[in-house]
Image (cartoon, helix red, strand yellow):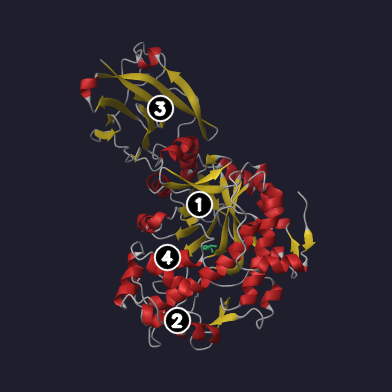
Amino acid sequence: MKTSLLPVSLAVAACLAFPGLAPAAPDATQPHLETRHGVRQLVVDGQPFLMLSGELHNSSTSSKEYMKPIWPQLARRNLNTVLAVITWELIEPQPGHFDFTTVDDTIQGARDSHLRLVILWFGSWKNGESSYQPAWVKADPQRYPWAKDRAGKTLNLLSTFGDATRDADARAFAALMRHLREVDGKEHTVLAMQVENEVGVLGDSRDFVPAANDAFAKPVPKELMNYLVQHQDTLAPELKTVWAANGNKPAGTWAEVFGPGKPDSAKNAAQLSQDEKDTLWRQFDWPVDEIFMAWRYSTYINKVAAAGKAEYNIPYYCNTWLQQPGTPRPGEFPSGCPEPEVHDVWRAGAPNIDILAPDIYIPQFEEVCQRYTRNGNPLLIPEAASTPDNALLAVLKYNAMCFSPFGIEGRGGFNPQAAPGVGAATPDSLAQTYAILGYLAPVILENQGRGTITRLPAVTDTNAPPQELKLGDYTLHFAYGAPNQGGGRRGGGGGPRAYGPYPPVDNNSPARLVINSAPGEYYLVGGPMRVSFTANQPDRGDVVLGSFDETMYVDGHWVPGRRLNGDETSDNRNWPALGSFGIYRYSVFQRQ
Ligand code: DGJ
């Protein structure tokens, strides 16, 4: 792949900056979103795709050498996609002169390890603040203004009231997307784009530059009011309540429509007690300031995204620093970020953004999944703590298209040469979980939205009482305790995975589930245990085992194993005991 340092002609540059550019027509051969069984899925090369991901640390992809040992390590840990940063400062060191070395190195590194990428565009903002804009932007605050707080102090973030900043960011982003189309338009290593990172004002509840104060005193723009009126039945309940509390006005200034902003006398975060923080963090405090900033950021980013989509139209998303106990109020979390209470504002302001995404570091993981799947928003989790059980919850219950722990290459004493943890003293349970999800991904994706997937509790107590699960035409009965090794009537054949030459996976693996993939067909992840089936309509005949397949665990991956029959299943007259944890496929039928 060639490195380029390209001047962009002024004509092209000017054209790229113009808002209102039509996105390039969606091309079904490029990564795109499709709704299947009511679920919005990522489709890559004609097939739904589940991103089993991790996000790299912020600075990793700035060095090809640093990344060299990391790519294969991530592939060995069963990731199929890596979220990787590309920065404005490195691709446009001088205005209009582009250097795509980091982009090309990142794509090549991923390809060499058969990984896909999501690219995170660190442009005007990263975690609310601004440090990734090129030096020529930083050095010219007249042209590229910084935000201010209510006391007139300059904040460490670019103001959304800087059209030149927005247009320069849009030009750079468009150049990046054009380059991606040129180098990756056929191979599809890059699956999606994150536009900016955790935007929003930090340090006050809104921006107070003079242009912001003028805009705040004016009526709410018609585009936003029309959207709210047209979508009033489906608005987020938090926004609906605020609008109603202020009289459901169809027009008016920001404060008339959404109520008062943060009072000058409000305590700052450092003055709040822990109790106050715990109480405040689920409230929609000073909503007008947050709504105002959500409109500013969404409309700014929509123009950046439009310039990019005109070049290369793949899925785009924005990520969120969530409101949480440590940062309960706007300005403590970035004010204007796509928090769930302002999703409607973002939808109205940024139609070029396909997905609003949460970065989930708080324990209320499921509550966040619920709030980010309202109104058909697909779940894409670009940052999370590395909790495999949450990966399963997100993918299996909330149809997530991506789960991605942050800082995936480790911290501090990270040793990129170390073997992955599967089967080792410290099992890498994320790698184990991804191995299972990766093996079953086509089945999971085919079954999302159909109500045919059930997670099972992890039962490792051999005295645990039996359980049952009614799913489809049958009820599955699970019994724990020591299964018969071998399982066959002649005792020598080896039942499922009882004598495999492969290392057993950690029996505490959180992945335990059943998928009723077709009438009478069940994928089961679990063990050791015994599983038998009864019919939900017994009058249709006795339940008989049609076929039974095991999988094998080889070099950290699941691969198809034996079709078990004969001695191993007593000629299919017995329900085979599952000697160890594994992935099994049953077909059953009823015989009169
Ligand atoms: C959230 C940010 O989006 C990431 O870039 C990174 O800074 C993490 N926080 C650090 O925990």
Task: Name the mark on residue 219.
Answer: 2
Q: Between label 2 and label 4, give the one nearer the viewer.
A: 2
Q: Residues within 10 Å of mark 2 (few under 14, many from 20)?
A: some
Q: Which mark is residue 489?
A: none
Label 2 SS: loop
Q: Name the amino acid type tagged 2.
A: Pro
For marks 3 and 4, give the CA distance: 43 Å
Q: Amino acid at mark 1?
A: Ser
Q: Position of residue 571 (x, y in %)?
A: 36, 12
Horizontal and vertical percent position of residue 521: 37, 27
Q: Which residue is mark 4?
A: 344
Q: Which residue shows up at 58% across the image and 47% down it?
A: 31
Circle nearer the N terminus (1, 3): 1
N-terminal label among 2 and 3: 2
Q: How far separated are the C-alphas under marks 2 and 4?
A: 18 Å
Which quadrant of the figure has residue 177? bottom right
Amino acid type indicated by mark 4:
Asp
Q: Sequence-wise, which precedes: disc 2 or disc 4?
A: 2
Crowd band around label 4 with a 10 angstrom C-alpha radius: few (<14), some (14–19), many (20+): many
Label 3 secondary element: strand
Task: Kindly report which numbered mark, 2 or 3, lies closer to the viewer in this rendering.
Answer: 2
Residue carrying label 1:
404
Question: On the rendered structure, is 224 left or right of 82?
Answer: left
Foreground residue among 243 and 194:
243
Q: Nearer the viewer, mark 1 or mark 2?
A: 2
Q: Residue 494's image quarter? A: top left
Distance (Cα) linking label 4 and label 1: 25 Å
* Figure check: 91 above or below 484: below
Q: Quadrant of residue 196?
A: bottom right
What numbered label is drawn on residue 585?
3
